Image (spheres, rainbow, N blue to C red):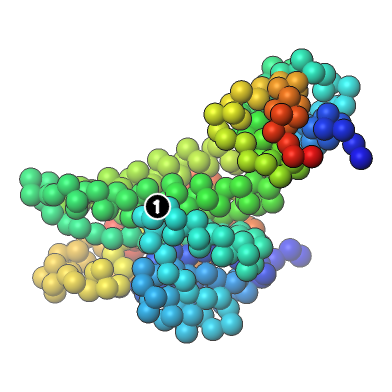
């Protein structure tokens, strides 16, 4: 019987892999025999990724907002591994502010890092995936891209933008054996949510039927599934992983 | 050694899955050979690789017929 979860020998690029959700994704893919290239914004972050991946891959420094940096990393992957099967666009930042106080650079930096980077990286991997008639692009969006969240007009717009991008690209390249999907985390136990106060957390838990934060591995599990051969017929979709906080 | 014309035609046959006799000089990829826009992008990619050249987007957009493809390669190839 064909193992529909078999990813052995594939090559993945995971952006923002030094901690949190990206790290869990990189580790879960590596545990299934995938060679993982994880990225961080700094050399020390890249080294930390190399340390935890060991023989299963490596960390590289990447600025997702810099075209030349993206091109260099993709060339490195091509030269070193000769293929790229899975792209996980995970790198993201927040620059929260009420709209009335939001600065242009807060808006622009979130758009560049969270949305334009996905355009840039997806475009960069397209030729190889088209030629091989195989590929998985998985974009990490967010529940707030669907529900909205005060103080995050920039972040919510970028994450909702990802969903539209995902659907359009999915239609463009479905006939070439490439799928494009989103995984939309709810409140996950990472540095991004550790900044919340206990009061904020209690208020959030009141809206989460599962009554707890999600774990990074629970996002990674959805990513692994979408990357697997068994998910070949799922494209343009968003899988929400949020403990029931938003059912869409 | 095949001529440029033969090599271009061979790529068109492979990429678009059409019969060799259909690949006439005046044949339009879109109207006569059933290619969609993505097929044409892939065809240009294949030509770039076969002839080790880079075809700029604005030139690629003009390659709409078999003849146009052959002419482009003839005037830009180092072979």
User: Is residue A212 shown above or below B5?
Assistant: below
Q: Which residue appears at 56% of the width and 60% of the height?
A: A75
Q: Taking B18 as reference, is A20 left or right?
A: left
Q: Taking A98 as reference, is A153 left or right?
A: right
Q: Is residue B69 among what the camera can see?
A: no
Q: Taking A110 as reference, is A124 left or right?
A: right
| Observer-nearest of A118 and B5 | B5
Residue at the right extreme, as displayed = B1
Q: Name the residue beneath numbered marker 1.
A: A117
Q: Quadrant of residue B49?
A: top right
* Quadrant (top left/top right/bottom left/bottom right) for the N terminus of chain A: bottom right
Q: Taking B37 as reference, is A165 left or right?
A: left
In the rendering, at what x and y percent does residue A150 appear? 15, 51
Q: Which residue appears at 59% of the width and 28% of the height?
A: B59
In the rendering, at what x and y percent does residue A24 appear? 44, 73
In the rendering, at what x and y percent does residue A227 appear? 56, 60
| Observer-nearest of A22 and B38 | B38
Residue at mark 1: chain: A
User: Is residue A160 shown above or below A4?
Assistant: above
Give neighbour class at mark 1: few <14, some 14-19, many 20+ (Cα, 10 Å).
many
In the rendering, at what x and y percent does residue B25 appear? 80, 18
| Observer-nearest of B36 and A42 | A42
Secondary structure category for the residue under label 1: helix
Q: Is residue A64 among what the camera can see?
A: yes
Q: Which residue appears at 75% of the width and 21% of the height?
A: B67
Q: Which residue appears at 92% of the width and 40% of the height?
A: B1
| Observer-nearest of A182 and A68 | A68
Image label count: 1
């Amino acid at each position: 019987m064909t193992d529909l979860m078999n990813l052995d020998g594939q090559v993945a690029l995971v952006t923002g892999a030094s901690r949190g959700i990206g790290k869990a994704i990189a580790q879960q893919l590596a545990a299934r025999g995938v060679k993982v290239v994880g990225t961080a914004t700094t050399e020390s972050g890249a080294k930390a990724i190399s340390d935890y991946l060991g023989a299963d891959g490596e960390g590289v420094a990447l600025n997702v907002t810099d075209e030349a940096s993206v091109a260099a990393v993709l060339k490195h992957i091509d030269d070193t591994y000769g293929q790229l099967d899975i792209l996980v666009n995970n790198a993201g930042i927040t620059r929260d502010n009420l709209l009335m106080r939001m600065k242009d650079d807060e808006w622009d930096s979130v758009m560049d890092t969270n949305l334009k980077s996905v355009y840039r990286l997806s475009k960069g991997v397209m030729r190889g995936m088209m030629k091989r008639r195989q590929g998985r692009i998985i974009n990490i969006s967010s529940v707030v891209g669907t529900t909205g969240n005060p103080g995050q007009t920039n972040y919510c717009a970028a994450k909702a933008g990802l969903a539209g991008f995902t659907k359009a690209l999915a239609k463009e390249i479905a006939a070439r054996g490439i799928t494009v999907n989103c995984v939309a985390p709810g409140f996950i136990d990472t540095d991004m949510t550790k900044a919340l106060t206990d009061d904020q957390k209690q208020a959030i838990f009141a809206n989460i039927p599962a009554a707890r934060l999600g774990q990074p591995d629970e996002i990674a599990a959805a990513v692994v599934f979408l990357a697997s051969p068994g998910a070949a017929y799922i494209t343009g979709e968003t899988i929400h992983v949020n403990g029931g906080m938003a059912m869409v | 050694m095949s001529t440029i014309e033969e090599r271009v035609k061979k790529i068109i046959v492979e990429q678009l899955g059409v019969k060799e006799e259909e690949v006439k000089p005046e044949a339009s990829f879109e109207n006569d050979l059933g290619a969609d826009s993505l097929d044409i992008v892939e065809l240009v990619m294949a030509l770039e690789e076969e002839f080790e050249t880079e075809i700029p987007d604005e030139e690629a957009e003009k390659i709409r017929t078999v003849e146009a493809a052959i002419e482009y390669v003839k005037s830009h190839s180092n072979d």
